[in-house]
Image: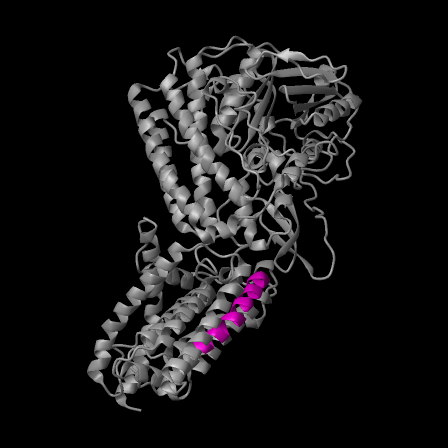
Amino acid sequence: MPPGIGGLRLAPLPGAVPAWRASVDSDGLRRVCEAVAGSGGRLGALWASDERDRGAGFVLHAVLVAFEGLVCVDVRLDGETYADVSDIFPAAGRMQRAIADLMGLRAGMRDTRGWLRHGAWREDAFPLRRDVALDARLPAGDPRYAFVPVEGEGVHEIPVGPVHAGIIEPGHFRFSVVGERVLRLEERLGYTHKGVEKRFESLSLEEGARLAARVSGDSSVAFSWAYAMALETAAARKVPERALWLRALLLERERVANHLGDLGALGNDGGLAFGLAQFSRMKEHLLRNNAALFGHRYLMDRVVPGGVTVDLDAAGADSILAEADRLEDELRTLRDIYYDHAGLQDRCINCGRLTSRTAAALGVVGLAARASGHAIDARVFPGHAPYGELGPRLCSHRNGDVAARIVVRFEEAFESLDLQRKVLHTLPSTPTLVRLPEIAQRAFGIGWIEGWRGEVLVAVEADAGGRIRRCHPHDPSWQNWPALEHAVIGNIVPDFPLINKSFNLSYAGADL
Amino acid sequence: MSAAGIAAQFAELALAVLLAPLLTGWVNQCRAWLQNKSAPGILQPYRVLAKLFQKEVILAHNASPLFRSAPYLIFGSLALSAAIVPTLGTDLPLNEAADAIALVGLLALARLFIALAAMDVGTAFGTLGARREMMVGFLAEPALLMVFFTASLISHSTSLSTIVAAIAHRELVIYPSMAFAGVAFVMVSLAENARIPIDNPATHLELTMIHEAMVLEYSGRHLALIEWAASLKLFVHMCIGLALFFPFGIAGGGDWLGLVLALPALAAKLAVGGAALALIEMLSAKMRIFRAPEFLGTAFLLAVLAMLVHVMLEG
């Protein structure tokens, strides 16, 4: 049933997840946003496309996550401005700033600073517009950036990054502190902007799957599946059952691998190197098993539009079942050690609390939302195939602190192992790959997958000749990065790495 | 002052300076083993030092002479403190010049210079680390002094040689006070040497660092000297612990054979001590920085208790 949004004509999209599409004008966007926000919905993604070559000016696209499913709203703009929605959905702020950098459309918000640009191109150049060539060399712009100053007795700033003492992704964090206490944190991201969206436009729909798998390397399966789902929606074609179940198997393996890695890293950041050693070993076994069974440690390019490129025989299934039993045993032991370790618990409990209210106000998604008491999981709702049949258990916690995010990771890892067993016990025997029919020009599709970090959205519009007209991959980190700024307030500076790791957000996925 | 004493003095100094990185290598090896990892070679710290000595020194534009001279001063004061602690023999010429209180002073001097140098360049991390280091330092020093005073009460002297001679060469007496002092000393040493649970020597997270944050701006031979000095500090602390609580095997005055036999005894004791340190580190997580005062406050309390116990039970 489509969500009832006053006077909006919603056309259903024929995909695996319930989704509708509608066109509104610039004022209509705010109305729709208010209606969705009013009924407890949130913003999924926001991007823009350049339709001037078709005589339609610029178009703003918003994906809203309503109770009933996704509402994709296209807003045809007359000029280069549109109505600001960041007061309704705070998460929209950075997306709007990115749109201003890439497409030159302004929302009239107070914050007019660039987000992705970093002086790599000038303020009046917009690389994502269609009249800018893919290989165009744009003159460098002004790299200065005005951080919000915090003033007062004893307040000082600590700039951290983008080059860190360890080998990690680049991001700049500006702390305003009194002594060791954090008054304010301001993030500055965009250091890994590489023009992924522009690159998509030069690829065929088929080639796009490879790029989608590499948007954020730790969520390769989630992005691949979301991209495949988008194309399957655009083609209005269902994929064979066995392919869907194998996709779920791969997605759960990706989830377990990342949770294992994070749990180890969280122990290490708490100074418990033992945890890192144990979890790294377990993760490595899993990755090696991936390589042996599916030919790739991180499962890149195993999920493709139309199905999956891999299959599993009985021996493979047995090895996964044996691995699941072993992992579960070891996880139980390690869980007891983590939960009983006074020193580690002292670090994690009440550290980096994201309250349920803040999480709701910021539209936080995924694991972080569940750890703050929100029942958000795209596997449970809408529960697209095969998850409807698998019936995953939603794992959540109320405290919203680092300890809660550790608990949710443990519980989800156990649940993922169970889901893998269920998949292997009921794996239907059908083909694993079908050829998608030719996708018509202007056909639009959307994919929505609960990756390990949160919900991954990919929207694709096809061009003539099986090319990509526009593709927007959306990582959940867009919504969750601002939440980190709030979770850190009032904590002490040396606890930040632990809090940051407990969210473990993607830089590459959000910088695009 | 005997020939054996002078020989012992030089042997001790050379031993400390040359073997300190070996102890660090051993601790790192034990840590790796305890994590089921294949360990780096025990000589790895020497390789790191050799590499750093060959590297070019990069200085910040606004670095003052203090920043450049600090590594030498730090290394110097730690080498001198190593010479005071009796490791092989108690008949040390230098011991007449400096007692336990001077030793604490020398350690404080090294800390002062490393903190000043950290603030010299004006980076956020240097200041952050220096601030934390001074907090740890001002809490650790009194506790360390109290430990020494307990030992002094037993031996009626603040000279380390006399303390060691008094404890090692008496008939076997069990001092309950030394048990309290020993626990306090271990806690202080963990904090002083930037080990878990106060600091994490293996971390790459600049925001959590104490010692590492202070030396982020150093490179080349300066960094080599600071790393070497850090090894020396661990060596010195370990030797103080062994001298106060397990002084057996340390040669008395003029005892040539004792001096020769003291070396394997020392090596064995250091090996056990290093393994114990690695075990402590592996079992604990790093504390929140504001737990450090509680931790060191406990150490101070235990050290004071040790003195009281001595006065009440052993006096």
Residue appearing at x 63%, y 60% in the figure:
A179
Q: Farthest left residue?
A: B257
Residue located 58% across and 47% down the image: A352
Using the image as rendered, state which of residue A193 and residue A37 is in the foreground. A37
Horizontal side, residue B183 vs residue A223: left or right: left
Near-viewer residue (A113 or A446): A446
Q: Is residue B215 above or below residue A334?
A: below
Q: Residue at x 39, y 10 (%)?
A: A430
Residue that lies at the very extreme toward the front in this rendered image? B312
Instruction: Quarter of the image for the N terminus of chain A: give it.
Output: top right
Residue B172 is a magenta residue: no
How far across and down, in percent of the image, does residue A344 sit? 47, 51
B136 is within the stretch colored magenta: yes
Asked if residue A435 is positioned above or below residue A260 in the image, the reply reads above
Image position, residue B255 (x, y; %): 22, 85
- For the C terminus of chain A, give its image quadrant: top right
Q: In the figure, is residue A326 to the left or right of A203?
A: left
Q: Main secondary structure of the magenta part?
A: helix
Q: Tell me where the magenta segment starts and ends, as one range.
A: B126-148
Q: Position of residue B81 (x, y in %)?
A: 41, 77
Q: Residue at x 66, y 36 (%)?
A: A362
